[in-house]
Amino acid sequence: MTEPQNLRTLFASAEAQRKQLESAFETSSSAYQQSLGAAKATYEECRRFADDLSLFSPNETVDDISSGDLQYILIDYYLAELMIRDNTSDRKGVLRRTREAYERYLSLLETYEVLPGGDRKLFERFLENRDSFSTASTTDAAARRETKIARFKEEKAMKKKLEHLAQNPTALQGDDAALRDLYLTNIRFCAHQAFQSLESIAQELQILAMAPPTPPAGAEATTSDYRERNGTVDKYSDRLDPPISQLLAGGKAGPILSKDGKPLRPFTLLDSREQLRKGVFRPGHNLPTMTIDEYLEEERRRGGIIEGGGEASAVRPEPDEDNYEKADEETMKARAWDEFTEANPKYVFVRLALEEIVLTVFAEVPVIP
């Protein structure tokens, strides 16, 4: 079959637009969406040309298609790849139209028996249940893992072959068999990608089916925010506990009386002391469990308070002359110390030096009576 010149030019233009979109970064911009719409329109026109020319017929096999016409089999696939990037509010409609384009592409491959045996079974499963289609088993985790690994290896092998042929363009010149092999490999690779996209589309449609319905245009949303219902949007604060004035007002903002003494809103006279107590001791606050004196006494018992030092350390209590036992104890203690100092003069020198250091360090420590 002779390849029409206008279809060749139109398809080349569509391919140039598609490759330009693939290198774009801002996919949500209006300029990108306009370019996307132009590319889709060009592919749609290519599809109409191919249908008008009866380029593909169910009565033919893939061997009856010329090598130059094989690339036009991918029109629906490229169109689906562009459709799914459409950034519109009707996401469900975009996904369904994309699924239809993928289905047209895979149906054409099945007609020409280009799909391998495994992909042919996958396409049958897709036609049986489009909404819950999956490339692997959803019940057996081990089987699902093995299927994923096998399909990954197939995809890697086809991608490696395509890269090798793309890096050697001179090998395709004048070799119709090599060019035909390149087109067929690319067609099978795109079919592999189409099944993955169909699985993703089915999952996304299931998620969108569980989403709440979109409110009609122009309908005012009901006010559900607490601050909006109470008119305190402008008075928002990150503070978790409201101020005392708000607690006394019963959660209602604004003054109770006007400047003339007229009541602005209903109110109830309550004991302000009780209200203040409720405003402080609420869940989430650490309530005191002891007085300050009890706390200091507990700290003194635990040894957390340093006593002595400073000028108070120089004050010596006067001995009780009538307490003979205490006097004898002090005498024996002094005598034992004298005997020890005579036997260990070096130790006495070190101790005196340490006492001098301690007195110097703690000389300024305040004394708690």
Image (cartoon, rainbow, N blue to C red):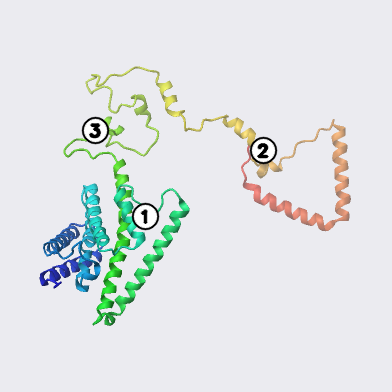
Instruction: Decide if residue 280 is on the left or right side of residue 203.
Output: right
- Label 1 with label 3: CB-CB less than 8 Å: no
> Mark 1 = which residue?
135
Where on the picture, by quarter, is residue 294? top right
Instruction: Place residue 316 in its image quadrant.
Output: top right
- Which is nearer the N-term, disc 2 or disc 1? 1
Give me the C-alpha separation between circle 2 and circle 1: 71 Å
Q: Secondary structure at mark 2?
A: helix
Please give the name of the residue rendered at 45% of the width and 58% of the height, measured from the top-left corner. 146
The residue at which mark 3 appears reads as 222
Amino acid beneath label 3: Thr
> Disc 1 or 3, which lies upstream in sequence?
1
Dot 1 crowding, Cα within 10 Å, few <14, some 14–19, many 20+: some
Left or right of 159, for residue 145 = right
- Residue beneath disc 2: 302
Q: Position of residue 204 (x, y in %)?
A: 31, 49
Please identify the quadrant where the N terminus is shown. Answer: bottom left
| Crowd rating for badge 2 (residues with CA inside 10 Å; few <14, some 14–19, many 20+) | few
Q: Amino acid at mark 2?
A: Arg
* Callout 1 amino acid: Thr
| Residue 225 vs residue 341, the one in the foreground | 225
**Disc sitting over residue 351 in the figure:** none
